[in-house]
Structure formats: structure tokens, C-alpha cells
Image (tube, rainbow, N blue to C red):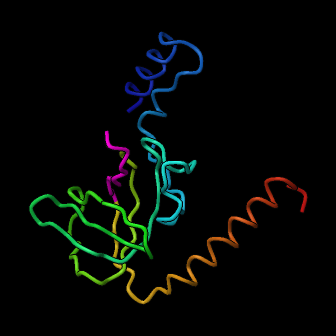
Amino acid sequence: MLYFLKLLAELEALLGDGFSLMALFEIKSGALVTLQDLRPSSPFFKQGASLRITGKLHGYSLETGIATIIDGDDILKVNTEHLRDLSFQVGSIYQFIGELRIQPENEGVLQARVGRKVDGIDLNLYHQSLLLLRQFQANHLNNPAT
């Protein structure tokens, strides 16, 4: 392990300031977003963004591993090929964490690395709590002393 870390340090030194190989291997937490937040004009709608999304399963293809989730009028495809031991039931509510892949036709597909069934969650209450969390974070980022 020590040899590996030394090798990484040497490679970083060769590549110059501001470059970190460790950052390439970093797994980011998923930003809490709603499907409404994933429109092309949104700051969350960017290639490789690490996101956590929640929605009702509208459809699932066993052949492709693509799940379609909805929340109100908004819809998102989720690639579930890397998930194991998760059964899919249309009408159930799921939460996924993964990276957004933007397709050539400007359609977002979440490449899920984590998924779970969250039946019983009240999506309206979830949205309200997410709004309150964002307000709290905005207030505390602007006024760290409070």
C-alpha cells in the first residue's frame, strides 16, 4: 500500500500543480435533487454530476436494465445494470444515487451505483423537507456565524 501511495505522489509531481490522481478515484456523495431539478437549464443537469433522486417506478426493462421513474409530470431513465439484489415493482417508490450521463439528444440518464426501495415515503413531505434544507443551507452559507 505504501508503494502505491508513493507511486501516486510521484505521478502527481510529474503532472504538475493542481492535479490529483486521488480525486479521480473519489466517490462523491449524491446531491439531493428532485426530478423537477433535472431540466437542461438546471445547474444540476451536467455530465457526471453525482445525484440522489427519488421517484415512483413507471417501468422497467429486464433486457436493458433501464428503469423509468416519475415524479408528477417529470420523468428520468435510470441505468440499473450495476445494481444487485434489488427487485423492481412498478408503482413502488425508489431512491437512486449515481452519476448523470447526458445523451446526445440532451436527455439525462442516471447511471445508478446505489438503489433502494423506499415505499411509504411521502413524496410531498420529502419535497417540502428538501426545500427547507436548501433554505437552511443557503442561509448558513451566506451567514456562517448564525
Q: Is residue 138 a member of the stretch shown in magenta?
A: no
Residue 69 figure quarter: bottom left
Question: Residue visible at 37% across and 51% down?
Answer: 108
Instruction: Tell me where residue 135 appears, x and y as whole percent.
Output: 74, 66
Q: Is residue 105 a member of the stretch shown in magenta?
A: yes
In the picture, the quarter occupied by the C terminus is bottom right
Task: Classify 25 as above or below 54.
Answer: above
Asked whether, in this view, residue 6 is left or right of residue 143, the answer is left
Instruction: Tell me where residue 46 appears, x and y as whole percent.
Output: 48, 43
Question: Residue visible at 66% across and 71% down?
Answer: 131
Asked whether, in this view, residue 144 is left or right of residue 44, the answer is right
Task: Classify 110 as above or below 18.
Answer: below
Q: Main secondary structure of the magenta part?
A: strand
Instruction: Tell me where residue 20 appears, x and y as whole percent.
Output: 51, 26
Asked whether, in this view, residue 64 is left or right of residue 69, the answer is left
In the image, the segment drawn in magenta is 104-113
Instruction: Tell me where residue 34 appears, x and y as whole percent.
Output: 51, 66
Question: Residue visible at 90% across and 57% down?
Answer: 145
Depth check: give the residue in front, 141 or 102: 102
Asked whether, in this view, residue 20 is left or right of residue 110, the answer is right
